[in-house]
């Protein structure tokens, strides 16, 4: 099925561990982005990419790293997990970066850091 | 600072009622997106608009550019409409979506 695939759906990490959240899309979308969703707050942009080889920081990039080696994949790396990174993470893609291009969201990854 | 504010935060309605969710945004926002987040967590795009009005089934989205205000209306609400509705503005220096905190809608049978 066409769309955005996120893995894993759930993850528990210990403080200091590293891990990679995977995001893949098969719609040939140029724009991909990562968000975190915390209780009482709107989704906040972590990192985004407007095409292969191009990434940029969003509102809350600290503690996260990304790369975009292919159009399809946009992994998010937690370098040294902290309890403050406990959140639900969403990946989204769009044909291009622009005001009236629709977004397709992945199903989310619920991450708990203990 | 680019901001998007939604109201109400929570909304309970009886089946069949007409529902309105409001979204106000700041200067620098050039388009509004309305999204629906299901109880299971998935997020679906409903509308994108920069002017006027759009309709899809029982859902209607309007935007008033001069007043920097958008509304999402649901006619003849149904329990399956129960979800969190999120308004997001496109803009800012980097050209990304800026999200409101969401409106949690519960429609009772």
Image: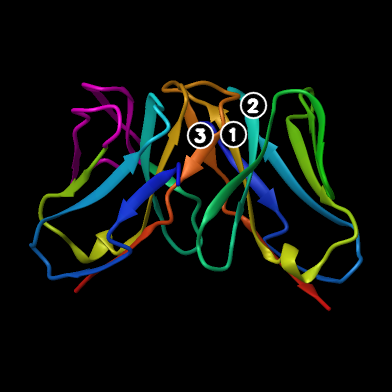
Q: Give A7 or B11, whichever is nearer the viewer.
A: A7
Q: Is residue B78 left or right of residue B8?
A: right
- Is A66 within the magenta? yes
Q: Secondary structure at mark 2?
A: strand
Same chain letter for marks 3 and 1: yes
Percent x, y for residue A73?
26, 36
Residue pointed to by mark 2 = B31
* Residue farthest to the front, as pictured: A1
Q: Residue tagged by mark 1? A: B89
The magenta-colored residue range is A46-73
Percent position (x, y) of residue B62? 81, 35
Q: Secondary structure at mark 1?
A: strand
Q: Which residue is mark 3?
A: B97
Q: Nearer the viewer, residue B36 or A113?
A: B36
Q: How many numbered discs, if any? A: 3
Give the class, few, some or many, for how many residues have Cα within 10 Å of label 3's Cα (few <14, many ≥20).
many
Residue B84, quarter of picture? bottom right
Q: Residue furthest bottom?
A: B109
Give the chain letter at badge 3: B
Quadrant of the image for the C terminus of chain A? bottom left
Mark found first going from the N terminus, 2 or 1: 2
Helix, strand or loop for disc 3: strand
């Amino acid at each position: 099925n066409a769309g955005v695939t996120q893995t894993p759906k759930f993850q528990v990490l210990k403080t200091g561990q590293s891990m990679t959240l995977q995001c893949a899309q098969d719609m040939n979308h140029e724009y991909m982005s990562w968000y975190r969703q915390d209780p009482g707050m709107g989704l906040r942009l972590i990192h985004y990419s407007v095409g292969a080889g191009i990434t940029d920081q969003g509102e809350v990039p600290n503690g996260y790293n990304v790369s975009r080696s292919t159009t399809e994949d946009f992994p998010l790396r937690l370098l040294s997990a902290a309890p403050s990174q406990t959140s639900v993470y969403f990946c989204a893609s769009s044909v291009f970066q622009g005001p009236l291009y629709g977004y397709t969201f992945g199903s989310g990854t619920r991450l708990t850091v203990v | 600072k680019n901001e998007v504010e939604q109201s109400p935060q929570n909304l309970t309605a009886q089946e069949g009622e007409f529902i309105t969710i409001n979204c106000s945004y700041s200067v620098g926002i050039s388009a509004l997106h309305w999204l629906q987040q299901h109880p299971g967590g998935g997020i679906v795009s409903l509308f994108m608009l920069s002017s006027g009005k759009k309709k899809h089934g029982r859902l209607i989205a309007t935007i008033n550019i001069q007043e920097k205000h958008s509304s999402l209306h649901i006619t003849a609400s149904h329990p399956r409409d129960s979800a969190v509705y999120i308004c997001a503005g496109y803009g800012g220096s980097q050209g990304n979506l800026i999200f409101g905190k969401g409106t949690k809608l519960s429609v009772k049978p």
